[in-house]
Image (cartoon, coloured by chain):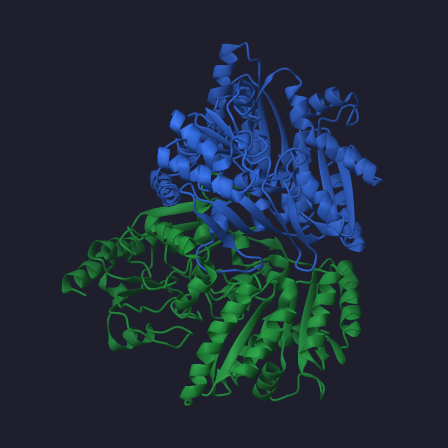
Chain colours: A blue, B green
Amino acid sequence: MSARFRESIAAAVGAGQVRDDEEALTAYAADALGQPHRPDLVVLPDSTAAVAAVARLCTEHRVPLVVRGAGTGYTGGAVPTRGGVVLSLERMNRILEIDELNLLAVVQPHVINGDLQRAVERVGLFYPPDPASLETSSIGGNVAECAGGPRAFKYGTTKRYVLALEAVLPTGEVVRTGSKAVKNVVGYDLTQLLVGSEGTLAIITEVTLRLLPKPPARMTLSAAFEEVRQAVDAVTALIARRVVPAAIELVDADSLRAVESYVGRAMVPAGSTAMVIVECDGMRSSVDEEMRLVVEACREAGATELRRAASDAERDELWGVRRQLSLALRATGLLKINHDVVVPRGRVPQLLDTVADLARAYRLRVASFGHAGDGNIHVNLMVDRTDDDELRRARQAERELFERVVALEGSISGEHGIGFAKAPYLPIELAPEEIALMKRVKAAFDPAGILNPGKIFP
Amino acid sequence: MSARFRESIAAAVGAGQVRDDEEALTAYAADALGQPHRPDLVVLPDSTAAVAAVARLCTEHRVPLVVRGAGTGYTGGAVPTRGGVVLSLERMNRILEIDELNLLAVVQPHVINGDLQRAVERVGLFYPPDPASLETSSIGGNVAECAGGPRAFKYGTTKRYVLALEAVLPTGEVVRTGSKAVKNVVGYDLTQLLVGSEGTLAIITEVTLRLLPKPPARMTLSAAFEEVRQAVDAVTALIARRVVPAAIELVDADSLRAVESYVGRAMVPAGSTAMVIVECDGMRSSVDEEMRLVVEACREAGATELRRAASDAERDELWGVRRQLSLALRATGLLKINHDVVVPRGRVPQLLDTVADLARAYRLRVASFGHAGDGNIHVNLMVDRTDDDELRRARQAERELFERVVALEGSISGEHGIGFAKAPYLPIELAPEEIALMKRVKAAFDPAGILNPGKIFP
């Protein structure tokens, strides 16, 4: 990186928004994937104009530009694998507007998901997307990755809530996509194209989100089962009964053991090895009606215990435990190779059979949990990081997992995206002409190829 | 069009799939906009391979290629304004799969919306998008235009239900986007980019749709009001009560008069000039609870009459009347200049004030109706086609309507798209750099610019 480029950046945005001290270069090197690459420069812009100035200079000087939200991604999307500038949006962190009449919110990218949820719930509104990282991840990052979460079963993922974006192109133009109207078919839907584009097409500087009325009632239930297969049967039975809970989550034996050891108490009765968490929401009367069907389905599938969260505190605790699953697995000291494969919703049994096959064939510990109702299961290969042979077997198992998921007409990622961690596997799912088409779309936004290079594409 | 090109097409797809007789050239010249342009050739392919062969030849010979669904569009999207080939997908009309376990359907593009709805409802499933044209429009056309309809208030428009597409690029490659999994963040979301792209990016040859469980109960109510303002107040009151009906529709005085004369009976009591139709669906108990709130809101706003559809037949009849509004307005003999503007949902009062202003200022009859809950109102300028001055005033009013809708942070089209009818007005809503970006995206799909040329862009 040339001294002239550094000076141009500082002149454009002010020296107070630029860092290249050792501490910054280390702090902005990694995300939750844990494979750091140091940037050459960190810029902390406080306005769209500053973002545009940085983008323009990066294109002009052909310097890689990597946008960073809260750094909670699992696939290295915010990591500057080719050096260059990390543009952290942490100073653009304000809720600009909560519009009760029009049921929408306008936010800067670095508003934390949980903060937004609480702010809109205070006025009786509701923002459904709830990734496990909701207390740390930012709306901008959620949009860039199309974050999901348990409530996606009923409410869909982030993309369903993004009405409009302000975004800066890598060439420095500021564009607006969509509008505050909930329907808009004017030109191409660039809003939805940007959602989930992993910071490779444009830099999102403002997000307009559709909100829902907050459901007046919620009820959460956990069910324990002796066998994971029974837990999956319960999920299938629920869907067959045409119930639409807000969330249907599954936790397997290894995940349960890890979380029990992490929180220091038993989550299920002795002899049970799997848990399902179901939440229903809506009008009070329909919640009761749905819960009755949920209980029926769980009993038929052989639940050993059914527990209703009796209070909001109990409900929050149950979801708290669910959200700590990743931390609990990390706390085992093993390397957690984390995948978020997804299959058509009825094929979770085949997916779990596949995972069991792979665990046996490659002699691996595997902990699985996640969004069973959506067919989206977090499959964690738990590997002794000092054991090279085990690491090698894990890499083989991973590739075979992806191949078998695609054979089940699923997808190699339902939530985390590709980043650089999964880029080598993209051709398992996409044909060469599909990848070529995506690259042409990328070039339409980023002709110089400076924005988040080395991500998504192999 | 050269003889050599005609021969190549016939050789590629078989002479039985090609027509250039007078009848065909006339029949495939227009859609519901009513401004015909004759094609040079009509091709009726029966397979994706045939579609790909035609696309490849059109790109090679630089011949315009216009894809046609059922021809029910209001903006001329299926009209070959520059001649060339019309590719009608009418022979690709099969439901390939209704998958109850995975809650999805796979269909060829020319399946009629209403036929699909009935087929999935027979097995307890539900496909929400319900454009007024549902008995005549095709799923492929619905996807190309991102069709909406009354139920979009609760259920969203077509885009929310498209999981995966098979599409043929103008250069002849066949690509697949998305998957049968409900979550998929692998690469760019080309599925959503194609939805609503008005046949300008690729030719959709297969659609995989997400389905919902059919709501066990439905209840429909119509409310009459003396003034349209009271009807809008009822809608606002409903939304403020945080009720989420499936549909909230508004019908104004001129629309009521037209439909009453068309169906030959009164729809509202004497002295009433506006109607609201509300449908609630879901669990039986919550439908009752919601309807209670709906009735409360309508009474408070001053409803002169409330009528519940007591049976399915009454319900179907009420919706039948609503769907005939466009026909009823046409039956007046006046030219119906049909717009589908949309504003943020709380701004319908301002939109109706705007329409009243314009009617006064330009001395025009205007009939408005539509999806009040979504802020999406069909504004119909009713013009004597023999009166040139009135036509001129209507064109002025139309431009001002678009400008004022955009000033209300809305959009010039919520459902019908741009086609060629609205292309001149695109710059009212989109900035030059946004249009330029969209054109680069277009070129990424269609380097020769042969697919539906002259549409969307001014």
Q: Residue at x 77, y 27 (%)?
A: A267
Q: Left or right: where does residue B293 sit relative to residue B356?
A: right
Q: Is residue B158 above or below residue B386?
A: above
Residue B102 visible at all: no
The quarter in which the N terminus of chain B is drawn is bottom left
Residue A447, image quadrant: top left
Q: Residue at x 63, y 45 (%)?
A: A153
Q: Left or right: where does residue A351 sit relative to residue A124?
A: left
Across and down, in percent, residue A106 comes to 62, 50
Q: Residue lying furthest right in this view?
A: A310
Across and down, in percent, residue B261 comes to 58, 88
Q: What is the count of numbered marks? A: 0
Q: Residue at x 58, y 28 (%)?
A: A379
Q: Residue at x 74, y 32 (%)?
A: A320
Across and down, in percent, residue B103 comes to 57, 50
Residue A8, image quadrant: top left
Residue B272 visible at all: yes
Residue A229, image quadrant: top right
Residue A138 or residue A54, whichever sits in front: A54
Residue A242 or residue B350, whichever sits in front: B350
Across and down, in percent, residue B163 comes to 50, 49
The quarter in which the C terminus of chain B is drawn is bottom left
